Amino acid sequence: MIGDKENVIEIIRRAFGENAYPGDNFLQGSLEGCEPYEEVGPFKGRSAWSSIEPGFLDAHAGALSFFSQAGFRFFLPAYLIADLHGQLKTADPLFHLTQGFSDITVEAPLKDRVFLLRTGKSEFVNPQRYGAMTFCDYARYRLSVFAREEAYAIVAYLKYKRDCASSVFIKDGIDAALESYWIQRAETAPARESLNQHLTEKAEFLAATLDSKEEP
């Protein structure tokens, strides 16, 4: 039964347990300013995500925004499990898995005009730097790092969080993310076996290339 918390935790452990540590030099995504380094830097050398203390995760809640995709994929399960145990006060992995899949519009009356301030999936990230990319485009790109088994575990987490949500607003946001991205991702993303096979074939090709160069 997916709805059982301990079962969801076990699904997460199985899905992410074999992932290799990306390496110290490949954890940080953003290089703008000092905050990304301050948030992500402390994760260097933490090659076993399952042993990271919830207090450490909470102290570096901002890392979820600044991880590279490899760093995000590797450390996310630690945040998910801590969240399911109710051990996070600041870090919010749910936000990072659902942001960008629904729109929120707020009216801001100023002088004789009512401005519509929109955030969410159809809002542009920053047209001067990223052109027509919306937050939905960015979310789909960033979250495409997860293999099929990992996406299935994330779906289990999201459904559990939805069932426990205290407000309709949170439930609607989770449902939007599930319906527009995660359920399909869990069904169609490349499986872990495909990733492993790809790495094996690339290694074999490289080895064969090196051998051919050494032949007289």
Image (cartoon, grey):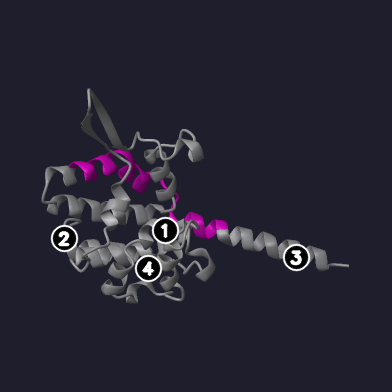
Q: Nearer the viewer, residue 210 or 59?
A: 59
Q: Residue 17, labelled with which disc?
A: 4
**Magenta-drawn segment:** 172-198
In the image, residue 27 sits, relative to residue 194, either above or below, namely: below
- Residue 85 drawn at (x, y percent): 19, 67
- Real-space Cα separation, disc 4 to disc 2, in angstroms: 20 Å
Residue at 40% from the left image edge and 49% from the top image edge: 143
Q: Which quadrant holds residue 92?
A: bottom left
Q: Residue 210, labelled with which disc?
A: 3
**Left or right position of 215 against 138:** right
**Left or right position of 138 against 212:** left
> Magenta span has 109?
no
- Residue 144 drawn at (x, y percent): 43, 48
Q: Quadrant of the C terminus?
A: bottom right
Q: Are marks 1 and 2 in contact (CB under 8 Å)?
A: no
Q: Amino acid at mark 4?
A: Gly
In the image, residue 108 sits, relative to residue 43, either above or below, namely: above
Residue at 36% from the left image edge and 56% from the top image edge: 150
- Real-space Cα separation, disc 4 to disc 3, in angstroms: 32 Å
First in sequence, mark 4 or 2: give its number: 2
Q: Are marks 4 and 2 in contact (CB under 8 Å)?
A: no
Q: Which residue is mark 1?
A: 66
- Real-space Cα separation, disc 1 to disc 4, in angstroms: 22 Å
Q: Amino acid at mark 3?
A: Leu
Q: Amino acid at mark 1?
A: Phe
For the residue carrying disc 2, how many other residues have a C-alpha within 10 Å: few (<14), some (14-19), or many (20+)?
A: few
Under circle 3, the secondary element is helix
* Mark whose residue sits in front, 1 or 2: 1
For the residue carrying disc 3, how many other residues have a C-alpha within 10 Å: few (<14), some (14-19), or many (20+)?
A: few
